[in-house]
Amino acid sequence: MAQDSTSFIAAMKQVWITDRIEEQIYTKSPLLEAFERVKPQKEVGDKAIVAVEGVLAGGYSAVPRTGSNALNAAGNRQVKRAEYNYTHHWFQVELETAVIDETSGQPLAVAEAVEYEMSGAVKGIRRQLTRQGFMNGDALIAKTTTTASSTTVKLDTTGYGYEAIVRGWLYPGLIIDIGTTGSETSIAADREITAVSKSKTEPTITISGAAVEPGTTQFVSIANARAGTTSNEMNGLLNMISETTTLGGIEPSAFPTWKANIDSTTTSLSLEALLERQDAIFQATGEEADWGLTGTKQYRNYYLELQNQVRFNGDGGLQGGDMSKLMLGVTAVEKQPDCPDKHFWLLTKGDLIAIRANGPEWADEKYGGTNKPVQYVPGTTKVKGALVYRMQTGLKRRDSHAGLTELTA
């Protein structure tokens, strides 16, 4: 007798429980793994409330040895509550029932089929969360450039066009919108990417449907990831590590620890520029950042900056290109494939947080009142389910981070 869907669904539930899914998402993304996963201290609707570190109280006095009857007024240490809006991340899983039939009476084969499908879902969520973690939360992936009416859309080389393709942010099968910042679908809605070109000088994506004619003021987004300037994506380093952006409802001007140190003018990486950022963190916190993070281009530039200072005693046994363990003082510097070429971050891992009440959950169990991760789809030969992850990224304090954000050389 053929293996029925009940056994298949049970195997999926057993193999892919919430804790395991969340662990898989984080541990294979060095950026996400650095975020401490915390539960909010309070939830109000779709807002997660977290206390953030403030400044010392003002109740200090210095008095003569004879004492004083006029001590300065007592005070409380300033503590702010950051209110982070949850973001909702969904990934659908669809399975052909033929897989179930072909694994008749073979529990191991059933589990392997589940493993194959679910690992793809986990990789998909990880890919999108990692991309968002490096950006600024506005859901704009890449900028377009002037394109004659066509289904092949040209992307701006300076607006993350080439980077979005080579980093796997835009790929065949992805459903996208193309539009202005104010209207996400002004050019195209719900189009599938059918092909990409990894050209450094003229990167392009080819989309399904009718020809379009975008210009220089449009952007590519995941379909339905934003409504105009309202984004459904999570915070990223660009808007979290900032001197001016409001984060968690707190303005930097209103709270001393809520202002990072950003250099948005330096275009050529130098040891001096990095040390200035490190000094700013040390001045604010008394400690240096414990993690340097950048993309492959600036990591190579940093290596060459250090290599130029190396002196050799002779030409025997020379070795070059060992970029495995670069340091900035006591701070380890790592390269990440998803980090844009323009960015170099100095971060304090202990202040990075991922706020969520639970890990990724099966939608049918969470919202449908069932005990099954997937359900049969009437009128088809498939079963389908979805993972939903309600979370947001944030910070405990901001001045323990710094960055260079406009590097080009």
Image (cartoon, helix red, strand yellow):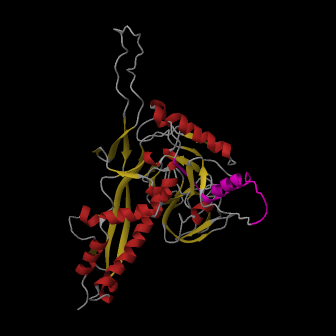
- The residue lying toward the viewer, choosing from 372 and 139, is 372
Considering every residue shown, the one lying at the far bottom of the view is: 1
Q: Residue at x 39, y 10 (%)?
A: 65
Rendered view: 206 above or below 352:
below
Whether residue 181 is visible: yes
Residue 291 falls inside the magenta stretch: yes
Side (left or right) of 194 relative to 367: right
Side (left or right) of 315 relative to 144: right
Residue 158 falls inside the magenta stretch: no
Rendered view: 70 above or below 302:
above
Q: Which residue is drawn at 48% across and 31% down?
A: 253
If the image is split into quadrants, where does the N terminus sit? Answer: bottom left
- The residue lying toward the viewer, choosing from 223 and 79, is 79
Q: Residue at x 31, y 87 (%)?
A: 103
> Magenta residues?
290-316
Q: Residue 164's spot in the image, x, y percent?
A: 57, 61
Quarter of the image where one finds residue 361: bottom left
Q: Residue 225's spot in the image, x, y percent?
A: 44, 57
- The residue lying toward the viewer, choosing from 34 and 258, is 34
Q: Which residue is drawn at 63% across and 68% down?
A: 198
Quarter of the image where one finds residue 367: bottom left
Side (left or right) of 293 relative to 377: right
